[in-house]
Amino acid sequence: MLQADLLSKSWGTPWSACATDGAYPRARDVRAVVDYALTHGWEPDHVGGKFLLTEKKHAGMFELADFLLTDRLWDSGSPDPTARVVHAFEQHPSG
């Protein structure tokens, strides 16, 4: 199994950063996640286990145009991603 928890970079909406904004990954985003995972050790034919694309290990090397990797969904001790979303928006405000 491949797992990559994605967080929308949308900001400047009626919602605050990191709130539900209705953004969903597109096919090209899923393809980018799969391609990255394949080049970083994921073996889809291997039975059992889970390959995690984590913020801690992969965020410095992998980012999508509209989404960031986050560990917050399964690790409550991971950093609040709000600053990363705001920074990403400021780098590319038009999306």
Image: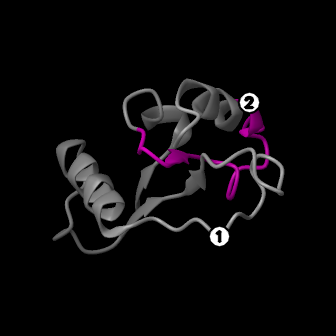
Residue drawn at x 74%, y 50% as measured from the top left: 18
Whether residue 19 is situated above or below residue 46 in the rendered picture: above
Q: Is residue 66 located in the magenta-colored stretch of the structure? A: yes
Residue 70 in the image: x percent, y percent?
A: 60, 47
User: Label 2 amino acid?
Assistant: Ala
Whether residue 47 is situated above or below residue 70 in the rendered picture: below
Residue drawn at x 78%, y 49% as measured from the top left: 76
Main secondary-structure element of the magenta-colored stretch: loop
Disc 1 from disc 2: Cα separation: 20 Å
Query: Left or right of 79: which side holds 53?
Result: left
Say which quarter of the image contains residue 31: bottom left
Residue 42 in the image: x percent, y percent?
A: 25, 54
**Could you say which is closer to the camera, residue 63 or residue 53?**
63
Task: Identify the image quadrant of the N terminus.
Answer: bottom left
Q: Which segment is the magenta one?
A: 63-83
Secondary structure beneath label 1: loop
Label of residue 83 in the image: 2
Q: Is residue 73 located in the magenta-colored stretch of the structure? A: yes
**Could you say which is closer to the camera, residue 93 or residue 24?**
93
User: Label 1 amino acid?
Assistant: Gly
What residue would you read off at disc 1? Answer: 22
Sequence-first disc among 1 and 2: 1
Residue drawn at x 47%, y 34% as measured from the top left: 59
